[in-house]
Image (cartoon, rainbow, N blue to C red):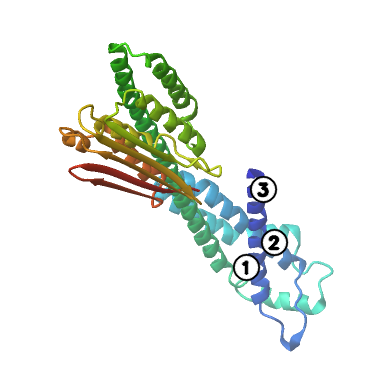
Amino acid sequence: MKRNKKLITVIAHIIAWVCFFSLPYIFFPRPKGGQMFSMSDNMLATFICINAILVLFYYFNTLVLIPRLFRKRNWLVYALSIILCFLVFLNAPKPIADLVARPDAPGVKTEQAQENRKIRSKPKKLTHYPGSYLAFILVFSVGLSVAAIQQWLKSEDMKKEIEHERVNTELSLLKSQINPHFFFNTLNNIYSLAIVKSDQTAEAILKLSAIMRYVLTETDQKLVPLSNEIEFLRNYINLQSVRLTDKVKLHVEIDDEVDGHQVAPLLFIPFVENAFKYGVSTVEPSDIRIRLLSTGHRVLFVVENSVVPGAKHSTVNTGIGIANVKRRLELLYPGKHKLVIDEQPQNYKVTLEIELA
């Protein structure tokens, strides 16, 4: 890919120079009477020298002078260098051409030779083709413009790379905050089972092991299969279910037909965790509803739980879990997600809709 890009650049430069060098010939004054225009060997050599100096000046300006002088704001030296290049352009082509092919060299047509003698009889010699001075200014302007555009594109690419690295770093930090937060709450639940010496303690530890394996092996990826995230949710729900009493009604509706979609990991778990943490009562009836449906390229996730008396303040300050998942959604799915949190005195509902790629 990189070699193809370089080849395309070289071809583009060649085409641009061919078109540029054709302009003087196109606009060169034609002899009267409709006769075909012809050049002497000396004029042809002069033409070639002028164009060669223009090519050398362009690349010398863009590859040496602009990077080393202009971009470092050494403008006085840069201006003097351009003036020196212009003086070389004014004085070098004709002497070089005379060395290669003398004026009126053998083989020149008689009429053309007479025309050349007339030109030499004039006070000023014809050392450049018409418009060559303008060509120098044009080459200088184009070189400066191209260098400026390249520098701007490079700056934009660097800004994007910096922003990309910033987002990746921020996401990594958010993940590192979510994981300990999640395990801290889960270990508290298992600790509660161990205190009462529940027979379900061993099963809970086994499920926690499966959850840890998922977090350690798969959540380093930017995207994971939605089916894996669903299995992770099921393990977590089963782990939390072991501590529920008959006072809690748990309704789970999860669609297993996900059509191979992928999603960012650990987006759903903070809301489920919040529902179990603040929506479970051992005294009064409480209700938790979890629903995850996949339709086309969209995933609908809904978590609804009763508000346990005394836990209203806690649902407002749910810690870093939900705050982090909001930020991750902004970074990973900008304009492609909709998160609605509906908090009522007796009910707390979260609706998340994500448009997957």
Q: Disc 1 on helix, strand or loop?
A: loop
Residue depicted at 37% across the width and 13% down the height? 199
Q: How crowded is mark 1: few (under 14 residues within 10 Å), some or many (20 or more)?
A: some
The location of residue 218, given as percent across then percent down, is 49, 29
- Whichever of labels 2 and 1 marks the residue nearer the N terminus, that label is 2
Q: In this view, does 72 lie above or below 131?
A: above
According to the image, label 2 marks what residue?
48
Q: Disc 2 on helix, strand or loop?
A: helix
- Whichever of labels 3 and 2 marks the residue nearer the N terminus, that label is 3
According to the image, label 3 marks what residue?
4
Report if the CB atoms under discs 2 and 1 are less than 8 Å apart: no
Q: How crowded is mark 2: few (under 14 residues within 10 Å), some or many (20 or more)?
A: some
Q: How crowded is mark 3: few (under 14 residues within 10 Å), some or many (20 or more)?
A: few
Q: Can residue 77 be seen in this view?
A: yes
Q: Which mark is residue 128?
A: 1
Q: In this view, does 268 lie to the left or right of 297?
A: left
- Whichever of labels 3 and 1 marks the residue nearer the N terminus, that label is 3
The location of residue 59, given as percent across then percent down, is 58, 51
Residue depicted at 36% across the width and 35% down the height? 170
Q: Is residue 308 above or below residue 81?
A: above
The location of residue 234, given as percent across then percent down, is 43, 31
Which residue is more in the foreground, 29 or 205? 205
